[in-house]
């Protein structure tokens, strides 16, 4: 069999179970990675390539949005802060966890994340009564992990290297459990995937160490923490932190996306975060401190506490586009794993079967197995080439020749001396002699006394192709194989028939968790009860009656109001009020503070047809289903966003609505709705409430109520100011009401009398007053034109001596014996109960 037949696509298909991601993979590579045309790039373990669409989307984002320093509080800074927080959630979602379980601390890279752990871990020195902390690490670890030893040694902490064999062979048969009498903290570090050979170590080792079943935890008393070095692993594999609850996980994003560089993160399990202690504190990390006294209180938020100074916010924002492009091109990390493993397995199979004309093998490959499964082997092939006499060809020679063929590989020890020594059989004394001979890490001295100092590594990324493998193998055959090229047919057939089968594995599900959740139940329906007037209830002092004059719902957060006369109440407030919101391309909620034209979108809810209509001047009307139907769960993407700092689970409403909104607003955006089975609780629970009221996408409470008398007072103040101001347009009462964007408008009270109420009864529904509504510059937006003015914020602030509150928040209570299925009707009478002082 000649090399051309051996490197045919048919031969490749016999080794590869999955290639590409559906559609024309070659076209995608040509469109997204045109700069790599003519280049065979095989150094993805060092840094993968970024798609062109990632940069286009990113540059469009930062050239159309103004991002300020997130430590400020102005609009551009708030946009940055919200976007960065959205990225944190997206990072956690990628690893199948949430902010309830883990925190994301952005760093300059994986090494900085490791250094952070080393400097903040509460190492305990040896005493007469206690052996002190142990820093333990797998010998197959990156230099940046072993380097923690430099810090611990200075503290008198024992550093214990553990070989992969010792880890399991010296394990105990039973779980030791937590030692309640000894809480000395120990740290064990190991890589999820070796950056040298691509070997994947069992993720179950995390629990094995934490439970003190594996060595050395089984022999040392104390509390054990696990640092899982995931930098190499997550580039092409799915890490599920629900299954693998490591305490610390350092990563570098360029190994996953190619861009941005200089950005990494430390994922910290919240249960373990409290024991990390800092000495240095930088900008943004302090809750309070004194410059003239040794007084410092750290920030409560874990991320804030450890991110010294301003984070690289523009690079963090780029991650949103990186995630989008990655999933758009590949579909899932599982697909990437299957694709890249297939390429690596094919390369390994053929390279290990290639022989010189005299029958001697061409390559010595450094691997623990035979690439049986992507569960145990990553997309890395590490080797040295051999000449026809069996002597190793220096890696520098291979590297130079590969460059002539425009093939990019990595050579040396790859910052992993432990694995290099183990695979190449280099003793500690030989390593020291190599240094005396002039060899240092990273140089081109590939042989010392005929023995190799390192090796050649090829690695694959999600955009790698069959042609990359083909060109590399043909290069090896052409440049380093003594003719005629022969093949070890017995070995080749054995490897082909042992084709990897990863189907059915629970460790790497083929469906992303965000699209595979079970959605329980639909939104609870509210039956309508037509009833006007007021109900005295059980109040001992009935008080006076007032009138409900207007009811407004805002189906889409920050969009125009929809006035109704009779409207049902649901468990979250007025049915369908703020059930949807518009987000930008980074998944951050758009409000009128950032996009004033939102007020020109006029959503309308048609209950009989269960339809939400989107209307705006100059646009065709489109419709969106009201109900969160089962089909939406399967066809729409589950996504996360934030409202007033709360993480909310949402459903995407599809491309038609997204296109309509993007066209109207002139920027990429999407319409998303709150999942019916997701609950969000009110932060300021009323004193009499047994449980916190449930919220839609509102900011603070289920309802906002304003008083016409209060509106009239502010209107008169504005009028008096405008008498001497040219060019200012006098606002009528209805225009002022629209600017305050209330759900309920009442009449019959004195100005600001509502501030002193504790309860209301409208119809057969009792409402609790949950506090006053603080106002911002958003009330200065004309709801008819989208233009910004100073009023009524200026007059409100002047009248209330800087206390910019207007209107009160309400939450509803169902009366005794009521099912809570009520309807509110305009013109209803209201009974108000004042606070009892």
Image (tube, rainbow, N blue to C red):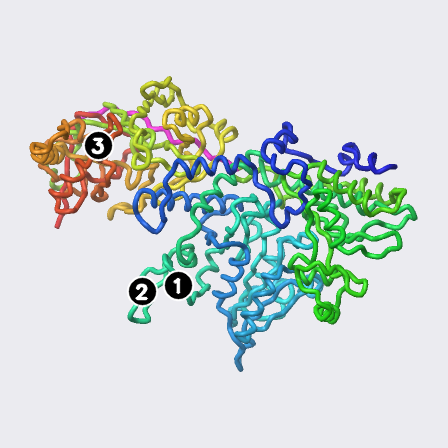
Q: The magenta stretch spans which residues?
A: 517-533
Task: Answer left or right for 486 relative to 291.
Answer: right
**Residue plotted at (20% across, 27% down):** 550
**Between 193 and 683, the one nearer to me in the picture:** 193
Residue 723, visible in the rendered structure: yes
Give the x, y percent position of residue 732. Answer: 14, 27
Task: Answer left or right for 571 relative to 378.
Answer: left
Prevailing secondary structure class for the magenta stretch in the rendered image: loop
**Residue plotted at (62% across, 56% down):** 191
Mark-to-mark CA distance, 1 and 2? 10 Å
Q: Secondary structure at mark 2?
A: strand
Task: Determine contact: label 1, label 2, CB under 8 Å.
Answer: yes
**Between 340 and 541, the one nearer to me in the picture:** 340
**Between 822 and 513, the one nearer to me in the picture:** 513
- Residue 739 has which mark? 3
Other-residue count near label 1 (Cα within 10 Å), few / some / many at <14 / 14–19 / ≥20: some
- Residue 281 has which mark? 1
Q: Which residue is mark 2?
A: 289
Magenta includes 526?
yes
Residue 504, visible in the rendered structure: no
Residue 374 found in image quarter = top right
Mark-to-mark CA distance, 3 and 1? 43 Å
Q: Is residue 296 above or below residue 788?
A: below
Residue 659 found in image quarter = top left
Give the x, y percent position of residue 158. Answer: 59, 73
Other-residue count near label 3 (Cα within 10 Å), few / some / many at <14 / 14–19 / ≥20: some
């Amino acid at each position: 069999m000649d090399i051309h037949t051996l490197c045919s696509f048919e031969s490749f298909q016999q080794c590869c179970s999955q290639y590409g991601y559906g559609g024309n993979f070659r076209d995608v590579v040509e469109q997204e990675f045109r700069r790599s045309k003519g280049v065979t790039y095989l150094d993805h373990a060092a840094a993968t390539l970024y798609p062109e669409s990632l940069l286009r989307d990113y540059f469009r984002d930062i050239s159309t949005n103004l991002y300020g320093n997130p430590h400020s509080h102005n609009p551009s800074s708030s946009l940055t802060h919200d976007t960065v927080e959205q990225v944190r959630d997206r990072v956690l979602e990628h690893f199948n966890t949430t902010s309830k379980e883990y925190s994301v601390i952005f760093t300059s890279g994986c090494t900085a994340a490791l250094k952070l752990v080393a400097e903040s871990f509460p190492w305990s020195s040896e005493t007469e009564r206690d052996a002190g902390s142990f820093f333990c690490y797998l010998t197959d670890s990156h230099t940046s992990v072993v380097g923690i030893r430099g810090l611990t040694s200075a503290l008198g902490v024992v550093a214990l290297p553990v070989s992969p064999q010792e880890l399991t062979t010296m394990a105990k048969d039973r779980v030791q459990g937590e030692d309640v009498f000894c809480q000395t903290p120990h740290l064990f570090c190991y890589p999820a995937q070796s950056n040298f050979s691509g070997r994947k170590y069992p993720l179950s080792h995390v629990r094995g160490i934490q439970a003190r079943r594996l060595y050395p935890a089984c022999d040392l008393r104390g509390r054990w923490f696990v640092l899982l070095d995931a930098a190499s692993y997550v580039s092409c594999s799915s890490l599920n932190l629900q299954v693998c609850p490591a305490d610390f996980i350092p990563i570098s994003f360029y190994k996953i996306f190619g861009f941005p560089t200089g950005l990494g993160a430390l994922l910290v399990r919240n249960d373990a975060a409290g024991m990390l202690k800092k000495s240095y504190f930088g900008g943004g990390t302090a809750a309070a401190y004194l410059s003239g006294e040794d007084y410092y209180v750290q920030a409560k938020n874990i991320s804030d506490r450890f991110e010294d100074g301003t984070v690289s916010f523009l690079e963090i924002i780029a991650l949103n586009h990186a995630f989008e492009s990655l999933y758009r091109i590949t579909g899932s990390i599982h697909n990437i794993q299957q694709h890249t493993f297939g390429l690596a397995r094919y390369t390994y199979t053929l390279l290990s079967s290639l022989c010189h004309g005299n029958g001697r093998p061409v390559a010595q490959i450094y691997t623990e197995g035979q690439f049986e499964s992507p569960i145990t082997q990553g997309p890395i092939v590490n080797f040295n080439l051999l000449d026809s006499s069996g002597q190793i060809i220096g890696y520098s020679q291979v590297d130079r020749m590969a460059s002539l063929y425009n093939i990019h590989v990595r050579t040396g020890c790859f910052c992993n001396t432990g694995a290099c020594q183990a695979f190449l059989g280099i003793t500690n004394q030989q390593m020291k002699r190599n240094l005396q001979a002039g060899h240092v890490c990273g140089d081109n001295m590939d042989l010392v006394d005929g023995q190799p100092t390192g090796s050649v590594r090829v690695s694959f990324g999600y955009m790698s192709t069959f042609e990359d493998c083909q060109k590399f193998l043909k290069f090896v055959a052409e440049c380093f194989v003594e003719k005629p090229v022969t093949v070890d047919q017995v070995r080749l057939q054995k490897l082909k028939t042992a084709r990897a089968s990863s189907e059915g594995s629970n460790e790497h599900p083929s469906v992303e968790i965000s699209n595979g959740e079970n959605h329980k139940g639909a939104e609870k329906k509210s039956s309508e009860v037509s009833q006007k007037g007021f109900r005295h209830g059980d109040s001992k002092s009935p008080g006076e009656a007032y009138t409900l004059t207007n009811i407004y719902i805002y189906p889409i957060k920050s969009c125009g109001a929809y006035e109704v006369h009779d409207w049902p109440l649901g468990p979250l407030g007025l049915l369908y009020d703020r059930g949807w919101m518009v987000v930008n391309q980074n998944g951050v909620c758009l409000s009128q503070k950032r996009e004033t034209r939102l007020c020109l979108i006029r959503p309308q809810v048609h209950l009989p047809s269960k339809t939400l209509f989107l209307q705006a001047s100059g646009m065709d009307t489109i419709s969106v289903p009201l109900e969160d139907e089962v089909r939406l769960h399967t066809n729409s993407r589950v996504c996360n966003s934030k409202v007033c700092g709360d993480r909310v689970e949402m459903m995407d409403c599809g491309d038609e609505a997204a296109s309509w909104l993007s066209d109207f607003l002139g920027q990429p955006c999407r319409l998303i709705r709150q999942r019916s089975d997701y609950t969000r609780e009110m932060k300021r629970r009323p004193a009499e409430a047994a449980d916190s009221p449930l919220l839609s996408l509102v900011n603070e409470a289920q309802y906002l109520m304003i008083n016409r008398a209060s509106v009239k007072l502010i209107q008169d103040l504005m009028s008096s100011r405008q008498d001497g101001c040219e060019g200012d347009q006098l606002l009528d009462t209805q225009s002022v009401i629209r600017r305050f964007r209330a759900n309920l408008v009442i009449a019959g009270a004195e100005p600001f009398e509502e501030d002193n109420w504790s309860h209301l009864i409208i119809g057969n529904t009792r409402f609790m007053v949950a506090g006053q509504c603080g106002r911002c510059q958003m009330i200065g937006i004309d709801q008819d034109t989208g233009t910004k003015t100073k009023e009524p914020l200026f007059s409100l602030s002047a009248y209330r001596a800087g206390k910019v509150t207007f209107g009160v928040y309400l939450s509803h209570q169902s009366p005794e014996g009521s099912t809570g299925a009520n309807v509110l009707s305009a013109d209803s009478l209201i009974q108000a109960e004042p606070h009892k002082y």
